[in-house]
Amino acid sequence: MQNNIGNTFGNTTIIAPITTYKNSKFTKIDGVWYIESEKDGEKIKRKLDFYEIPVELEEDPIQKIIGVTNVVHMKEVSKKRLSRTPIAKVTVDNFNEIREAVMKNLNLL
């Protein structure tokens, strides 16, 4: 989430964690995201809050991620905790959705 100057020169970076949801499906209806999953054999559909953005990855990621970025849980972490090689990268449109959720969460919209 941090800009490249901070990422290049700082010892820490700001992240928004991703909660993974295996065997789940995300759908967007009238601009609102929903997650569909199964628990104990029962299908569950839940509306995502504005701060939960499904991850959309660029083509051919090293690791496929099915999950949600939760901007409410943004935090600063040591760059030592991060891999030198990114395993995946979100699309530009997805990053813009995440950025908008951050702005809304901070009441900057």
Image (cartoon, grey):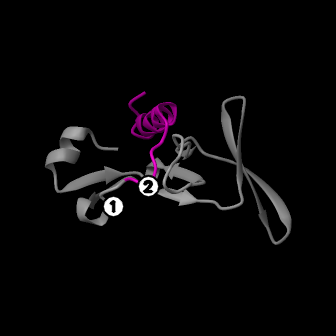
Q: Residue at x 82, y 72 (%)?
A: 40
Which disc, if any, is residue 87?
Answer: 2
Location of mark 1 (residue) = 83
* Residue 80 percent coordinates (x, y): 24, 64
Residue type, mark 1 in image: Ser
Task: Kindly state the secondary structure of the residue where label 2 is placed.
Answer: loop
* Residue 72 percent coordinates (x, y): 45, 51
Residue type, mark 2 in image: Ile
Residue 53, compared with residue 66, is above or below; it is: above
- Which is more toward the observer, 25 or 72? 25
Horizontal relation, residue 85 to residue 73: left or right = left
Using a 10 Å C-alpha cutoff, classify the residue at mark 1 as few (fewer than 14 neighbours), some (14 to 19) or many (20 or more). Answer: few
Segment tinted magenta in the rendering: 86-109
Q: Quadrant of the N terminus?
A: top left
Which disc, if any, is residue 95?
Answer: none
Residue 64, compared with residue 109, is above or below; it is: below
Q: Quadrant of the C terminus?
A: top left
Residue 60, compared with residue 96, is above or below; it is: below
Horizontal relation, residue 87 to residue 67: left or right = left
- Asked whether disc 1 touches disc 2, contact meaning CB atoms under 8 Å apart, the reply is yes
* Residue 94 percent coordinates (x, y): 51, 36
